[in-house]
Image: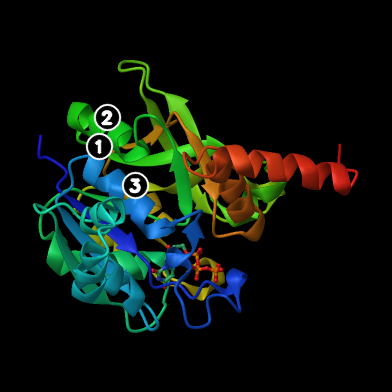
Amino acid sequence: MKKIKKAVFPVAGLGTRFLPATKANPKEMLPIVDKPLIQYAVEEAVDAGCTELVFITGRNKRSIEDHFDKAYELETELSYKNKVELLEHVQKIIPDNVTCIYIRQTEALGLGHAVLCAQAAIDNEPFAVILADDLIDASKGAITQMVELYQQTGSNIIAVEQIDPEDTASYGIVDVYADAVSGLNRVRNIVEKPQPQDAPSNLGVVGRYILNPTIFNLLRTTPRGAGGEIQLTDAIAASLLHETLLACYFDGTRYDCGSKLGYLHANLVYGLNHPQVGADFKEIIRQTAAKLNLI
Ligand code: UTP
């Protein structure tokens, strides 16, 4: 089985739900406490063994390239002031054996189109796709869990979780059954953003995928779907005619950081668990809750 060495990070979306914060800054650079969302995603990919990271960028996304680049001035300054720990944090953002490639999606035509933009960099290899705005807190990274399943099966894999049945119109929704022979969770059907009455289940796709390169031919012929965008879900649905698709019920907690509430929730939990500020933050929350009569 081929190893998963490449990971694609589509970061070219407009991030309209976070305007005006995302007018000039990418959503993926929003911090959870002190680390931007995209760095959590990159760390997850690197932990899973990926060494080639492909970012699909758009306008106003330069800060992502800068974030993963060497910052000579900053490093000199930190070193001069003997701020050793901070210097290490800044230098360790990308390990030496990892390469970053940036490809511009000139128009935000949808997630499927963004993934198609990665074709030249991916070539004929299986790859991971990570949406940084789905932050997953897990002791073993979600992509690592999926890579392990890929090594056993060689199949396309999507991460899924139970979602509120009211929210189906915000997700790709899958119909899953247990394969009689392998016992693995196979996807029978996948639909992008159905209304609750049309949804085949309340199992939603979250932003982690392992895909074989056969997906590119399908993406090339995928017409615009929900929201007038070229949807990755539609190409994956077309793959079901010829290929097995597995659902991975990953272990971990997902925060939808593309929405304001999910983002605030993640900051609350990561803030409480933060080694430097967690204890003081807890006290602030306790005092604030008492002052506002929340408890
Ligand atoms: P979203 O559906 O969250 O869209 O995209 P968005 O534009 O980022 O945010 P809103 O809905 O306007 O607030 C899911 C992922 O796909 C990427 C986004 O960057 C995000 O990681 N994407 C989306 C692209 O890279 N290109 C696109 O054309 C669309």
How far apart are labels 1 and 3 at the CA level? 11 Å
Q: Residue furthest front?
A: 81
Mark 2 within 8 Å of ligand 1, using the beta carbon: no
Above or below residue 46? Residue 12 is below
Q: Is mark 1 within 8 Å of ligand 1?
A: no
* Dot label at residue 149: 2
Q: Position of residue 182 (x, y in %)?
A: 30, 18
Specify the quadrant of the image occupied by residue 188: top left
Q: Which mark is residue 209?
A: 3
Instruction: Label 3, secondary structure: give it.
Output: strand
**Where does residue 35 sit, x and y in percent of width and height?**
42, 56
Which residue bears the numbered disc 1? 155
Name which residue lies at 91% across and 44% down.
293
Q: Residue 144, percent across and down?
A: 28, 35
Using the rendered image of the protein, determine whether residue 55 is visible from the camera's viewpoint: yes
Q: Nearer the viewer, residue 47 or 234?
A: 47
Q: Are marks 2 and 1 in contact (CB under 8 Å)?
A: yes
Task: Looking at the image, tell me whether mark 3 or mark 2 is earlier in sequence order.
Answer: 2
